[in-house]
Image (cartoon, grey):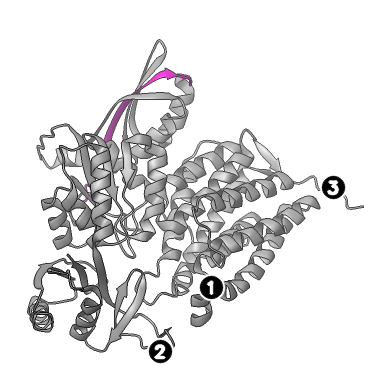
Amino acid sequence: MMESCNEMIDGQDFRRMIDGAYRAFIREYEYINSLNVFPVPDGDTGTNMMLTMQTAARTLVSAPDTGIGPLSKRVADSAIMGARGNSGVILSQIFRGIARGLAGKQEATSSEIGKAFQYGILYAYRAVARPVEGTILTVAKGIAKGAHHAVRDNKPLVDILSEAIAAGREELKRTPELLPALKSAGVVDAGGQGLIAFLSGCAEGLSGECFSPESNFESTVVPSGYLPEGEQPSITHPYCTEFIIQPCSITLEDAKKLLIPCGESLVMAPGGDFLKVHIHSAHPGLVLEQALTWGTIHNIKIDNMADQHRHQVITHQAKKLEVISVASGDGIKKIMEELGAAAIIDGGQTMNPPVEQFVAAVHRGHAERYILLPNNKNIILAVAQAKKLLGDRLEMIATTNIPQGLAALTAFQEEASLEDNLARMQEAVNLVRSGSITQAVRDSLIDAEMVKAGSYIGVLAGKVVNHALTLGTALIDLTKKLVDAEASVVSVYYGEEVLLPEAQQIAHDLAETLPDVEIELYAGGQANYHFFVSVE
């Protein structure tokens, strides 16, 4: 009969595991990026997971907690707020499940930690509405099975992680057999590889055998949000955040211990059954999410002190409903603002904003409710997570590209109700026909035909539908596939890599090819994509 394992894991062990996992992503994120099989420049799975992991690891640097339960909760909250892209959101859900399994514990046995990791895998699986085999979820299930057997046998945590990793790697090898795109490219699933990196890093951190760069929380450039490029404030905690919790279920001292690591200039005023809080923070969304566990939040006020520092006076008029849109490119952003977007969050392909940015955008706004347009399929899960945190104050129309976002904005009517706007905007999204032109970043086999790296490719509904050696030919071929007998206007948005004279010549050639439709050319300024095309 196997001898019982009496190993105990404490908060310090947990800190080493999280730091080890972050170091593993620093080491491997570029390789994970390279596994993305779609031949457009969206190879950011590794980057998204690394940045989400960075947020989780950073929160432990100044965390005063010593118990493994409180530390895991702190990491989970931070990871959810900092999650980037679909892969980052899934990773954050693993932390959420781990925190549930360790809730209330100062230390835990190896079996309890193993069970907590199994909870994490379960939460990750639940985060995806339509699970697809051959993805990170297939690997997650394999990991859960491996961990289950080791936990049942009451093995030490290093052995539990080792068996979970081995089982996950076996499932990772199977992913090309489950997804034809992986098999065609000769790679395994990127998200699954990221999950293996996470667990391997945890094992390395626990054993003290990390061999990757030191954790550096200053190395990552934080997206600028609403501030123009080059105008980032020097204030380290730029958001003056005030709110009242009533009724409040936490003592003043406990609340103070929890909020001190979140910022500076903390002032707390208790009174009866309420608590007034004032704090300067770099992450107001994280502060408010912490406070939500103490009671009901009232009178939220968030001011950007960087704006005050620049002596900018902005007069806001409270509105019932506004739209927040995600976009990159100065031209696209300007068009969206002209169409009525109240705020633009910088993001898009290869630039996925974290959950925290969406939460902060709503909290520092002045409208009662918001409609958010992600305009990229890899941002949808992050927005959905933000909606869980914000409740009815935020709604989403799941736009997957810029033309859909522009169509939705065109249909928005400020004076109409939320329900009417959601219906009208969704109808506009359903009607728009759109595509994009970019360059293949690697050799790929598309419909039994080899597409060489550097070729211009047309993307329609998430699928490569044409390719050419010249940009103009690729655009014309794609537009022909979009135009039908009812089409009257073709809008073309050229990106930052296309000069105006070249764009004008291509638009002229397109007009000669399609004389029955009107061609409208706009400076989009977007990265990665040479053209966005939409047809009305």
Q: In terms of depth relative to the viewer, which is nearer, 479 or 272? A: 479
Where does the magenta region start and end? 231-251
Q: Nearer the viewer, mark 1 or mark 3?
A: 1
Of mark 3 and mark 2, the one earlier in the sequence is: 3
What's the distance in space between the residues labelled 2 and 1, CA to CA? 18 Å
**Does residue 90 appear in the picture of this structure?**
yes
Q: Earlier in the sequence, mark 1 or mark 3?
A: 3
| Label 3 CA crowd tier, 10 Å (few <14, some 14–19, many 20+) | few
- Residue farthest to the top, as pictured: 272
Q: Which residue is mark 2?
A: 449
Give percent across and percent down for residue 320.
20, 33
Q: Up-down: is 260 above or below 84?
A: above
238 drawn magenta: yes
Q: Amino acid at mark 3?
A: Ser
Say which amino acid is labelled 1. Leu
**Front in this rendered view, residue 114 or 453:** 453
Residue under circle 3? 4
Mark 3–mark 2 Cα distance, whole angstroms, equals 58 Å
Q: Which of pointers 2 and 1 lies earlier in the amino acid sequence?
A: 1
Question: Percent position (x, y) of residue 48?
Answer: 42, 60
In the image, taking residue 27 as reference, residue 277 lies left or right, namely: left
Q: Nearer the viewer, mark 3 or mark 2?
A: 2
Q: Nearer the viewer, residue 307 or 479?
A: 479
Residue 56 appears left or right of 431:
right
